[in-house]
Image (tube, rainbow, N blue to C red):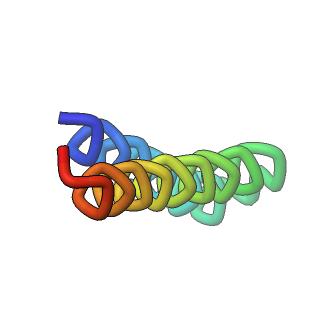
């Protein structure tokens, strides 16, 4: 479930970035890139947590 939320955040960020480029709104574009990075970080954290759980035998 967390992975889906992270992917959704990435998609939302990509849409914001694209809209910002189209409207020449640099702040919106930057905000979109930030949301994408946050989503990627959340996804990586979830992956790491799953790997740690798997390696500890739970």
Q: Residue 40 appears at what percent x and percent y?
A: 50, 60
Q: Which of 36 and 2 is in front in this view?
A: 2
| Image x and y of residue 18, in percent | 52, 62
Above-or-below relation of 4 to 36: above
Residue at horizontal 31%, vertical 54%? 56
Query: In the image as oriented, which residue stretches furthest toward the front?
Result: 57
Indicate the quadrant containing the N terminus: top left, top right, bottom left or bottom right.
Answer: top left
Give the position of the C terminus as an image quadrant. Answer: top left
In the depicted view, which residue is nearer to us: 2 or 16?
A: 2
Q: Nearer the viewer, residue 6 or 24?
A: 6
| Furthest residue toward right | 27
- Identified at 41% across, 42% down, the residue is 9
**Tally of numbered tags:** 0
The answer to whether residue 48 is left or right of residue 53 is right
Percent of width and height locating residue 38:
60, 48
> Taking 54 as reference, is 28 left or right?
right
- Residue at coordinates 76% horizontally, 54% vertically from top-left? 30
- In the displayed structure image, the side of residue 11 where residue 27 appears, left or right: right
- From the top left corner, tell me how far across and down residue 37 is, in percent: 61, 58
Q: In this view, does 22 lie to the left or right of 4?
A: right
């Amino acid at each position: 479930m967390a992975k889906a939320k992270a992917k959704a955040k990435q998609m939302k960020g990509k849409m914001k970035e694209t809209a910002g480029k189209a409207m020449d709104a640099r702040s919106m574009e930057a905000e979109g890139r930030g949301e994408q990075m946050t989503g990627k970080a959340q996804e990586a954290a979830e992956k790491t947590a799953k790997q740690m759980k798997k390696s500890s035998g739970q």
